[in-house]
Image (spheres, helix red, strand yellow):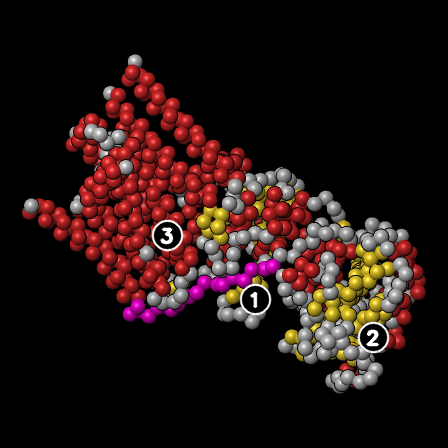
Amino acid sequence: MKKWLGHTNSVVLSVAAAGIFILLTLFLRSLGGFQVDLTAGKQYTLSDQTLTAIQGVKEDIRLIAFTVSTSQNQKLNRDVTDMLSEYAKRNSKLKVEQYDLNQEPLLAKEYGVTEASIVLVQGEKKRVIDIGSLFTQAQGSSEGAYQFSGEEKLTSGLLGLSSTRQGKVVFLTGHEEIPLSQMTGLSSSLAQDNVKTEEVQLNQAGSVPKDASVLAIVGPQRDISATELKSIRTYLEGGGKLFLALGFHPNMQSDWKNLDALAADYGVKDTHAIVVDQEQTNTLGPLFTVPTFGSHAITDKLAASNLYPVLSLSIALQAGEQKNWKTTALLKSSAASYGETNIQGLLNNETQKDDKDPQGPLDLGYAVNGKDGKPKAIILGTSALMSDTEISTGGNRDFVLNSLNYVQEQSDGLTIRPRQEQDYKVVYLTPAQAKTIMTLSVIGLPLLFAAAGILLWWRRRRA
Amino acid sequence: MRRLFAVCQKELQAYLWTPTTYFALAVYMLLTGLLFYTNFVMYQPSILDYRLVLGDTLSMLLFVVPLLTMRLVAEEFRQGTDELLLTSPVSVTEMIVGKFLASLGMLLILVLCSLAYPVVMSFYGSLDWTLVFTSVIGLFMLGAAMMAIGLFASTLSQHQMMSAVVSFIILLVFWMLDSFGGQTGASADLQQWLEPFSLTARFDSFTKGLLNGADVLYYVTVAVLFLLFSIQVVERKRWR
């Protein structure tokens, strides 16, 4: 009986211990983020926005990484898979899968993927993030350094997948605006936020589509007609929102009457002066401005992350008194800058400040809110930053997306600082060095232990 | 406690005075050295990242741990000294924990030997020592959990080789738990359930420079669980 009790006790205790172990392991798995990040740049510490987005996932999401393995991109692939595993650690509803794109072409085709990508799949919904777009060359830092903006893109993708909102930005055409075909980076970023984009020619359509959440006029080279202005005003008076981004044109002073009138509706005056900034500029020269931010919901997070846009050939704007609208400056040039009003002179490389030229700091963009505090318009004196050639420069993409999200009253537009990463450090070994390593690690150390073993065996045998 | 350390001391001495220990270490260093050489030197340019080297050398533990633990209790059974231990003032718990601590001493030597590779790498360029530090902690924790499994296997038989084979099989199963199942459908769900119990999947965080609470506690609980199993197996002999 005593023996039987002893055995039973033993079995019960062992089974209970195994049960506790299984439950504890599964429970601890749910506390995935319970960790100390000792990496130099806190590489695996996710931002609050990301953690909130991950916790918000209620239905299973597959995070499928299609990577292409070459000897050059091992580190980049590892950055991607490490990031995905950090997300999956924090919510069991996120399931990571990784495939080699070249080995799984049929599966890749199923998701419409032709290059290295992350595909987020939730039921019928899916989002594709191009892995190449997650990496950019780091400027002004050591060799082999690069920026990795995977967290921003993936979190944005997660939010977009679970979001039920559907925005639509309508881009005006017919006045030599920047066409959508040259703003594909912006369109795809908007698509990730569930915002559709489409072009409209008011002469043909007659009116701005009713389902447009914003009317965007980006870099027009010709003025809009009186009829078009009327249609636009009708749309805006009916609750529509405006995103007006002016671009440089030699005859803007005389030719932009209706465009200026549209801006003036919201208390913004176009000075027709091009900003020349010797202080806040980049290496390309004084016509490229790296502005400071005015305090606003659009810009505060960007300023905190040190993400500033780079603007070219910007037009100085002025905010006048307006009864119905409140204007807030978003972008400012430096105090040393001025607005060149002699456009012909500017075109001939003569940029000298004279009495007619307004002295900086100059405002380069405004957010316009109604009396009720609701956003109504974004008016910028710059537009080239939205084109494919400039969207990835500095904080251009973040600034534009934040502005468009703000004017659509969608506050979950994200800006998460990209991480500075270092590529593998490599070294070329000489044959002599290789031989030394071989002698030490493959021969020396094992031989040392083997010799100790033989010596011991021999001594014990003699003893 | 004094008795526990006495057992530990005796076992450590047994380790250090057994030629097999040195041959096991020699085999470990030879195999890991070859893998290190292949990874670091054979492909040029050499990549200064300990994580790449460690990944391959880690699997050598699967062979070395059974060799180092097979003798621990099986030898007592074979020589009949277990009877002495069971009737001595040393409790079974003290005996098992003492032997486990001795095996941790051996593991420490093994881990310190593995440090030779990052040291060699550091001669040719700057290495991220934070990653080396967390990787070494991870290696020790993984090894400790494996030693506990090996010790448990050693309680199951009086034949050392049998213990080593059983130990290897259990370790291999725990090692590959994250490879069972597939990436889609029901098999993906199975893999989702098994993955948290995999010895290797838990190691990744350490090599990235992370000290993850769940991973640390997993290794600790595996060690505690198998020590408890070992105690129960030896206790059963008392009831025979």
Asked which secondary structure carries label 1, the reply is: strand
Question: Residue at image x 43%, y 38%?
Answer: B197
Q: Is the residue at mark 3 from the same chain as the one at mark 2?
A: no
Q: What's the magenta region?
A: A417-433
Question: Residue at image x 86%, y 52%?
Answer: A239
Query: How far apart in space, not on screen, are marks 3 and 2 (Cα)?
Result: 64 Å
- Tell me the residue that label 1 is attached to: A137
The quarter holding residue A242 reads bottom right
Asked which secondary structure carries label 2, the reply is: strand
Asked which secondary structure carries label 3, the reply is: helix
Q: Which of pointers 1 and 2 indicates the residue nearer the eye?
A: 2
Label 3 Cα crowd, 10 Å radius (few <14 / some 14-19 / many 20+):
many
Q: Are marks 1 and 2 in contact (CB under 8 Å)?
A: no
Question: Residue at image x 26%, y 21%?
Answer: B239
Residue A59: in magenta span: no
- Tell me the residue that label 3 is attached to: B136
Q: Residue furthest left?
A: A462
Tell which subunit mark 3 falls on: B
